[in-house]
Image (cartoon, helix red, strand yellow):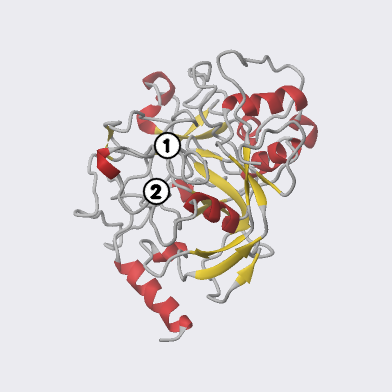
Amino acid sequence: MSWQKLTLYMMVLSALAIHGACADGEQTCDAESPCEGADGEEQDVGCGCSALNRQKSGETVESEKEKYRSDHVSQIDEATYPRTNQMVLLKGDTFTMGTDEPKIPLDGEYPTREITLDSFYFDVYETTNAEFEHFVNATGYVTEAERFGDSFVLEARISEEVKKDITQAVAAAPWWLPVKGADWRHPEGPDTDIKARMDHPAVHTSWNDAVEYCQWAGKRLPTEAEWEFAARGGLKNRLFPWGNKLTPKGEHRMNIWQGTFPTENTAEDGYAGTAPVTSFPPNKYGLYNTVGNVWEWVSDWWTVNHEPTPQSNPTGPASGNDKVKKGGSYMCHLSYCYRYRCEARSQNTVDSSAANLGFRCAADKLPDNIECNNC
């Protein structure tokens, strides 16, 4: 079977498969009991993350001068939250990217292809609130969520007081609500803060925000190929950075959703929301939380068409509408968003932000004053 015919075949299979869930009033559904849309067809929305895009009907961010201000009050206590901006050197190598057994074919998880990468540096941890605050303290940067005035939060994590003023929801995923005043400092809305979460990943950060941070830090966003190489930790054709078993020896290795999505997270892994970036064992490259916890932006424009031929240092399409994000988040569940796998992927527009969306950086050269853990 030719690669083109295989692509068409997998797209048909994906259209027939159940990879998402939906809500209709009080009804919930899962892989064993799919919901139907108004036309009677099964819907494929996952956790709804890819639907969290800014409206383009005249909505704009404030002027460039509003990107920076000087009235920010620092919350950093380095005695309690030591720096987590370490990197590792990942030496150039060839690895197998993607899979020939995609769980969500419409996401473009296939085919496998041999990718050769030059050496690069990669952040050990996701960018924390403390590290992001160092950036804001130094530059006065104002995130897009702050400039837009709102961002997306899971309904179950919003207070009843804040909910009273919300009149909209995401049509494809009504458990996501746009919350005024939700941003990196106020993850679930204006009545929440990060004082006890400075070692958690910074969320409500758009792709544009992530690029600004990385440039300030003397780094850049990783390519999708670099990210997947790093996440796999030297293992080949494995679902997770540690192997194929979700909970080896009964141990949780990442922060995802347990229970009934989207109404109950039993938090058997220890966390109902984000977790500290140092949580769970690292992979063989010494990297923490490359799957679960929060989605991580990469530099590539989104496409689902990949040539199966060998490539060197691929950077993705030259242009597009959405950027790729990798790794899944604490909201991912087998029945709804089985995207906490190394080859899994999703997408959003460059100005989108949400309570489960963060990033980490890469670099071609180790920035000054950055510790390298394996150099």
Q: Is residue 66 left or right of residue 146?
A: right
Expressed as whole percent of the image width and height from the top left, the position of residue 120 reads 67, 51
Q: Are marks 1 and 2 in contact (CB under 8 Å)?
A: yes
**Mark number for residue 110?**
none
Give the structural element (helix, strand or loop) at label 1.
loop
Toward the viewer: 287 or 201? 287
Residue identifier under label 1: 281
**Circle 2 Cα neighbour tier, 10 Å, few/some/many (<14 / 14–19 / ≥20):** many
Give the structural element (helix, strand or loop) at label 2.
loop
Q: Mark 1 vs mark 2: which is more N-terminal?
A: 2
Q: Residue at x 26, y 41 (%)?
A: 249
Amino acid type shown at disc 1: Pro
Does residue 121 show up?
yes
Does residue 322 show up?
no
Cα separation, mark 1 vs mark 2, equals 9 Å
Expressed as whole percent of the image width and height from the top left, the position of residue 96 reads 50, 65
Write down the quadrant of residue 264 in the picture.
top left
Q: Residue at x 30, y 68 (%)?
A: 16
Toward the viewer: 272 or 141? 272
Residue identifier under label 2: 242
**Circle 1 Cα neighbour tier, 10 Å, few/some/many (<14 / 14–19 / ≥20):** some
Toward the viewer: 298 or 247? 247
Q: Is residue 266 left or right of residue 131?
A: left
Write down the quadrant of residue 1 in the picture.
bottom left
Q: Residue at x 40, y 18 (%)?
A: 161
Q: Residue furthest left?
A: 32
Q: Is residue 23 left or right of residue 231?
A: left
Expressed as whole percent of the image width and height from the top left, the position of residue 253 reads 36, 39
Q: Residue at x 40, y 30 (%)?
A: 273
Q: Is residue 230 above or below residue 86?
A: below
